Amino acid sequence: MELGVVGKPNVGKSTFFAAATLAPAQIANYPFTTIEPNRGMAYVRHRCPHLDLGVPCKPSNSPCQDGVRLIPVELLDVAGLVPKAHEGRGLGNKFLDDLRQASALVHVIDATGGTDFEGNVVPPETHDPLEDVRFLEEELAHWIAGILSRNWEKEARHADLEEVPPEKVLYDRLTGLGLTEAQIHLALRETPLDAKMARWTAEDLFHLAHSLRKIGKPMILAANKADLASKERLETLVGVEGYRTVPTSAEFELALRRAAQARLVTYEPGASSFQISDPSKLSPPQAKGLEKIKTFLEARGSTGVQACVEEAVFKLLDLIVVFPVEDETHWTDKKGNVLPDAFLVPRGSTAMDVAFKVHTDLGKHFIRAIDGRSKMVVGRDHPVKDGDVIKIIAKA
């Protein structure tokens, strides 16, 4: 599962990425610092079922810290986007292609209004961050519309003659974007279109692209530099209709995580506070910086970076966590490891879906499943719930 970290240059994208993953990323106060995409691993938190079992877990794919399971999520930090990127301005075409497999997008915006469309520094409050949201929507729609429109008329006429459903035509064209047929079907329902695909105009394809982006690559807003933005500006951004918005201070989160790595503080990502390990080891600038961060955390509850990633996964994408096992009584795998794996799956997924998530062969040869909590046998269409422990039984 991949989240794309997007936005115009110089708004703190790479700082957000580094803060969420502690992966190295080039960070500087000028446009187009990022050229090649950065990849790193962030984590979302979930209560570990070993607390209910009363036996320590032995995780394989997701660490456990004090009963909190840390489930990995890949983050991709791509080059900054500027207006008309779909026409090749800036690093636009490369930026857009890098996002093909992202399940959702974290749009980092400068909540202070202190960077223009090109990513150049301007006086605070002189640029409206909402304009950045609108132009990014437009660029993404133009990008998808461009993919749809290539040789569209010829293929659409042929599909109409053969009575090929629009979902099938679009799925074949958009397979590289990771969109499902169900998502394409929803986008078609939302977009008024002629029954004959050959009659769809360029404007029709653009409107369809808007719907496809909204459904297939939903977006959360990270209102970054919240430590510098006014309260009124943050309230406006949080109230943007149609979007989830999380105020963030990526710079503060990165400082805390690096300080924790250096054992200067004790801090867990997403926490509302931290503890200084030994004040005598801090330089005056470090002590002053940590005091500033402490004040911010007391006011806002967190830096917002971890919250933004988790809201993207659990709210925007509506994913839940399941724990597949081979022994439904002891919740172990065949080697005796307790609760070895945790998987993110869409809410509403069935036992069969979980089987395919674990391994294709398990899905193909699925017989039944067993709920590890109730010990009840369930069928392939049984919907799993968040936190379920489940055993899959398949033909040998």
Image (tube, rainbow, N blue to C red):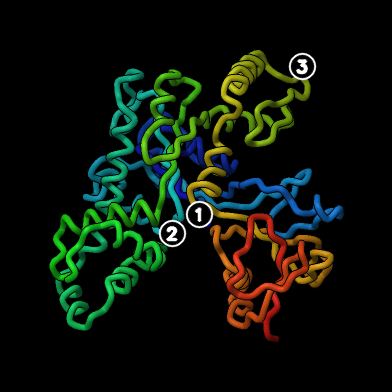
User: At which x and y percent is residue 264?
Assistant: 72, 27
Residue 277, compared with residue 340, is above or below; it is above
Gap in Å between the C-alphas at discs 3 and 1? 41 Å
Residue drawn at x 67%, y 77% is 368
Residue 160, compared with residue 314, is above or below; it is below
Mark 2 — residue?
A: 101
User: At which x and y percent is residue 215?
Assistant: 38, 55
Q: Quadrant of the C terminus?
A: bottom right
Question: Looking at the picture, which amino acid does disc 2 mark?
Answer: Gln
Question: Looking at the picture, which amino acid does disc 1 mark?
Answer: Glu
Gap in Å between the C-alphas at discs 2 and 3? 47 Å
Residue drawn at x 51%, y 49% is 75
Mark 1 — residue?
A: 2
Residue 327, compared with residue 18, is above or below; it is below
**SS at mark 2 in the image:** loop
The reply to whether dot 1 and dot 2 touch (C-beta < 8 Å) is: yes
The tally of labels here is: 3
Disc on the earlier residue, 1 or 2: 1
